[in-house]
Image: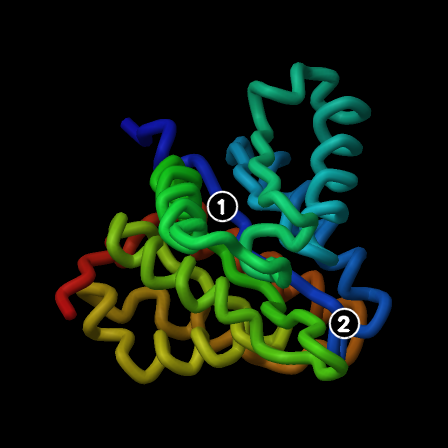
Amino acid sequence: MVSDRQKTVFISGSAYEYGKFGDSGRDFIRNLTKTLLRNHFKIVSGFGAGVGNHVIEGALFEIYLEKKSNLTDHFRVYPFPGGGGSNGYNGARADGLDAVWEDYRSDIISQAGIVIFIFGNKLEDISVREADGMLKEFEIAKSHRALLIPVGASGYASEKLWKILLEKYDDYFDNREKFSLFERLGQPCNKEQDVTDLIDAILQIALVRSPEPWVTK
């Protein structure tokens, strides 16, 4: 029997810009959200800047127009103070607040058996930089033995995490049954069908939790 946690997905992401996806990055986020809900997953979001609002849009469309169901049965959002979201927070922090954010992140992520990482950038000073909060969320998710799905094609921190996972794949999983699907997560998306195929690869990994994640290192 699949547990509620195994069917709950945390979407980790922030985006000041969408890189090679351009404006279609917003549609990618909405369609990914709708696809997950359509396949009976529940979604948890930390409302990452540039990502969380499109997750909500996708969720509202699917839940109210298609499922005609209660929002809270399928979707939960946990915004971070300051409007930066779970891994794009840019505000000044009082002494000890970093530890509070870490506990908050851990509590949110612990609800999910699957964590999907998309984009992962933020505007800092006058430059677009890697969202270091996503790297923290990756480590937290790993500590909770969640199934880690970094979408390398979306670039930025998620691409970095995708490369790490592929390089150390055998440290995360006990067999290579889904290795080719993970490879697909980093393939460039040059047309609409590529994005559709990318979402399908994410779904196939999430639907069957084999290989079972066994974090050993």
Picture coordinates of residue 191 (x, y %)? Answer: 79, 75
| Closer to the camera in the image, 184 or 165 | 165
Q: Quadrant of the N terminus?
A: top left
* Residue 17's disc number: 2
* Labels 1, 2: front one: 2
Badge 1: residue crowd in 10 Å (few <14, some 14–19, many ≥20): many
Position of 122 compared to 201: left or right?
Answer: right
**Looking at the rendering, which quadrant does residue 214 occupy?**
bottom left
Residue at the spot 41% in from the left edge and 74% down from the top edge: 180
Q: Is 92 drawn above or below residue 130 in the view shown?
A: above
Residue hosting label 1 = 10
Check the image and name the residue furthest to the left.
Answer: 216
User: What percent of the width, then of the height, locates residue 207?
Assistant: 44, 46
Question: Which residue is situated farthest in the front direction here?
Answer: 95
Q: Amino acid at mark 1?
A: Phe
Locate residue 193, reporting x and y percent. Answer: 75, 68
In this rendering, position of residue 164 left or right of residue 123: left
Sequence-wise, which precedes: disc 1 or disc 2? 1
